[in-house]
Amino acid sequence: MHFKTVKDVVDHSRQLHQQISQFYHQLSEDNCKARVSMLLEYLKRHEDHLEDTLSKFGEDKSQSVLDSWFQYAPDQDLSEVMSSLEVSDHMDTDDVVSMALTLDDYFIDLYQGMVSNASSSAVKAVFQNLLDMEEHDKIQISKTALQMSDM
């Protein structure tokens, strides 16, 4: 087990969203299908928003909560998830949505584990808020993808 503060986990999650944003941007530039590129750019902006939200997250929480040590803190290594994604120049919108939902599931699983193992109600509330945000965003991505496929 790794011991980290709540702030460390939130900061690392922010960095992961930044990496995913860059990943979507690169895929968008490499893809020649207009609808797929539009969806990838939407996902990039979505990840930028999540990164920004996590940057501001610390401003809304008390320093004592952010400095709380958290025993259950996984490495948050996206490399396994990223390597399992099927990426190609011929991706369609369904492929992109599947990929985005897989990445969202990574954060949902992460935050569910953090909520389950939180040592205090304040720490639990932090990760429950992040979990709720990720679940809401997953629904929003699905809705946006459906709207794009109706175009």
Image: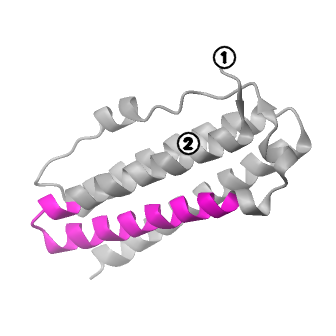
In the rendered image, which residue does mark 2 sit on?
12
Badge 2: residue crowd in 10 Å (few <14, some 14–19, many ≥20) = some
- Tell me the CA gap for discs 1 and 2: 16 Å
Q: Check if residue 49 falls in the magenta segment.
A: yes
Quadrant the C terminus occupies:
bottom left
Q: Check if residue 27 falls in the magenta segment.
A: no
Q: How is the image coloured?
A: one colour
Percent across and percent down for residue 60 are: 77, 63
Camera-near label (1 vs 2) is 2
* Residue 1: image tag: 1
Residue depicted at x 61% and y 57%: 54
Percent across and percent down for residue 41 are: 30, 69
Q: Which residues are magenta?
A: 28-57
Residue depicted at x 26% and y 53%: 95
Residue at the far top in the pictured view: 1
Q: Amino acid at mark 1?
A: Met
Residue depicted at x 37% and y 78%: 147
Foreground of the two, 81 or 79 = 79
Badge 1: residue crowd in 10 Å (few <14, some 14–19, many ≥20) = few
Quadrant the N terminus occupies:
top right
Q: Amino acid at mark 2?
A: His
